[in-house]
Structure formats: structure tokens, C-alpha cells
Image (tube, rainbow, N blue to C red):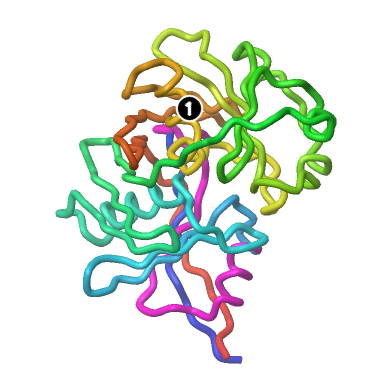
């Protein structure tokens, strides 16, 4: 059987400590593999996202796969990709432009921080139905719907202590997942959150840049009346995100650290 060997990097994003933040695998390729092969690589990696990128005339094309499907946008894997490109491919570059299923996105390198320029969303308030309350196991103070449900809790401790039923969350018909959030009680932070996407084969995503850009930053910027926010995601790995609301865009900054670099060998038809 004919095979091809690829370089693959695993980067912990939105952290400066290995084993923190959100790990993503990154494959920088000369040309695209078949979709089926990329999906199998993502499934084999069993990380929340594997990013695949190919250099084109005007920048890079970037795609993201969970173990279960391709997704339209992923923040931490974009940060991880920019980190890999900056450290191993284009160390002189300070800005990386990507074409994606969500349109053009860019990442700027500013010292140790990588700033993602992502589309902002407009979470709309929705009624808290008995079905929603039963699925998540509590009654939120507020509920919104954008790409996923945003459920607002009273205290950060409620977010930290929440025990989700992933099977029930996966059965919620609307939205791609559930985000829970509350004001932060820690000095220097504005809000805390956790994110659950069992429909996409990700029970709990450790640190989720796209959820901040599309949902959390627009909500908290409006609620707190400020454009610059510091967020903590309260998964077991935890992560810190430096956020800025910029109209129709959200700027999400974070650090990253390399965990591994290796070669993978995959069959080709």
C-alpha cells in the first residue's frame, strides 16, 4: 500500500504551560489529502480538533476536523496553526492570513500572544423551555441562542461545579452545543465559562476561542459595558483568553506552547 508521511505538531493553546489550555494537532501540507483521510487522522488523534493547512497564493487555506466531523470555525486550532507556522515555517512573519469555511480570518503575533481576528455573533435571547431545563439539569438566569446555546448562571462556582449529562445535551435539537457562563469572582477576570459539544464528538472542549468570538464576547461586552475583557475557561485544563469586542469582529488573544512534533504515516489511494 502506498503511504505518505506528514509532519504533525501538537500545541497547547490559550496557555503557556504544557498540559494546560486546549491541545490541537496541526498538519502543514503541500497539498490536500482526501476529506476521508483527514477525518480519519482527526479520529486517530482523538483531540477536539486537528487543523490542516496548505499555503496558497494569498495566504493559507485552513480546515478543522473534530473526531466526528469537519467544523466551520475553531479558535484554539487556529492559534495552534499560527504558532506552528511562526516557529517552524515563517519565523519572520508577524501576521498569518487564512481562508476558511467561515471566510477570511487572520492571526497577528504580538510577542508571546497570538491575536485571532474572528467574526462576532449576535446571540439572541430565547425562552427557557421545560425541555431545555431538563436537558441541562438546571434553570439558567438567562438563555440565548447563536451557533450554540448560551446559558447564564449566577456565580462562577456554579459554572465550575456543573455536572453535565452529555447524552441529554446531545439531544437538544437546536444549536451545536451548550455554553455556560457567569461573572468571574477572581481578580483580573471578567467572566468564566465552560463549553459542551457532544454532537460534534467533543463532550467538553477545554478552551474554545470560537465560542468566545461568536457568543461570549458579544454578550459580556454588552452586559458589562466594556470592549476589553479577560476570560477564564473552567475546564479541567483551564485557559485564559484576552478578548476585545470590535464591532462585527472579535479579537481573541492567547499564548501557546509546543507539546510534540512527530511524523505520521497515512495510506493514500
Question: In the structure shown, which secondary structural element does the residue marked by tag 1 occupy?
Answer: helix
Q: Is residue 252 above or below residue 265?
A: above
Left or right: residue 249 versus residue 159 is left
Left or right: residue 245 versus residue 197 is left
Split into 4 quadrants, where in the image is the C terminus? bottom right
Check disc 1 and report the residue beneath it: 219
User: Would you say residue 81 sits in the magenta stretch?
Assistant: no
Q: Residue 187, percent across and down?
A: 43, 8
Q: Which residues are magenta?
A: 15-43
Q: Is residue 51 above or below residue 135?
A: below
Write down the quadrant of residue 66 in the picture: bottom right
Left or right: residue 47 versus residue 250 is right
Within 10 Å of disc 1 (Cα), the crowding (few <14, some 14-19, many 20+) is many
Q: Is residue 217 above or below residue 100?
A: above
Q: Residue 238, percent across and down?
A: 54, 29
User: Would you say residue 38 sits in the magenta stretch?
Assistant: yes
The foreground one among 124 and 5 is 124
Name the residue at the left extreme: 92
Q: Is residue 8 above or below residue 123?
A: below
Residue drawn at the location 67% of the way across and 53% of the way down: 200
Residue drawn at the location 59% of the way across and 68% of the way down: 41
Residue drawn at the location 45% of the way across and 45% of the way down: 76
Q: Residue 7, percent across and down?
A: 43, 67
Split into 4 quadrants, where in the image is the N terminus? bottom right
The foreground one among 71 and 25 is 71
Write down the quadrant of residue 104 in the picture: bottom left
Residue drawn at the location 61% of the way across and 77% of the way down: 36
* Count of numbered circles in the view: 1
Amino acid at each position: 500500500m502506498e503511504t505518505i508521511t506528514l509532519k504533525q505538531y501538537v500545541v497547547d493553546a490559550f496557555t503557556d504551560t504544557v498540559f494546560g489550555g486546549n491541545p490541537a494537532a496541526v498538519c502543514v501540507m503541500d497539498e490536500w489529502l482526501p476529506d476521508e483521510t483527514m477525518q480519519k487522522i482527526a479520529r486517530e488523534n482523538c483531540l477536539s480538533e486537528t487543523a490542516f493547512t496548505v499555503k496558497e497564493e494569498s495566504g493559507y487555506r485552513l480546515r478543522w476536523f473534530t473526531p466526528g466531523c469537519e467544523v466551520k470555525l475553531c479558535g484554539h486550532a487556529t492559534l495552534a496553526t499560527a504558532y506552528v507556522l511562526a516557529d517552524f515555517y515563517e519565523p519572520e512573519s508577524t501576521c498569518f492570513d487564512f481562508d476558511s469555511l467561515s471566510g477570511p480570518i487572520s492571526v497577528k503575533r504580538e510577542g508571546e500572544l497570538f491575536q485571532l481576528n474572528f467574526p462576532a455573533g449576535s446571540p439572541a435571547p430565547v425562552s427557557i423551555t421545560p425541555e431545555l431545563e431538563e436537558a441541562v439539569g438546571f434553570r439558567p438566569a438567562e438563555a440565548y441562542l447563536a451557533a450554540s446555546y448560551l446559558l447564564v448562571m449566577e456565580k462562577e462556582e456554579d459554572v465550575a461545579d456543573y455536572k453535565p449529562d452529555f447524552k441529554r445535551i446531545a439531544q437538544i435539537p437546536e444549536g451545536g452545543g451548550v455554553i455556560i457562563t457567569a461573572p468571574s469572582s477572581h481578580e483580573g477576570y471578567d467572566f468564566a465559562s465552560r463549553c459542551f459539544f457532544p454532537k460534534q464528538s467533543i463532550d467538553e472542549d477545554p478552551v474554545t476561542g470560537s465560542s468566545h468570538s461568536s457568543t461570549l464576547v458579544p454578550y459580556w461586552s454588552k452586559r458589562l459595558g466594556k470592549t476589553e475583557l479577560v476570560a477564564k475557561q473552567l475546564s479541567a485544563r483551564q485557559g485564559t483568553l484576552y478578548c476585545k469586542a470590535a464591532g462585527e469582529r472579535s479579537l481573541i488573544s492567547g499564548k501557546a506552547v509546543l507539546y510534540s512534533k512527530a511524523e505520521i504515516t497515512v495510506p493514500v489511494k
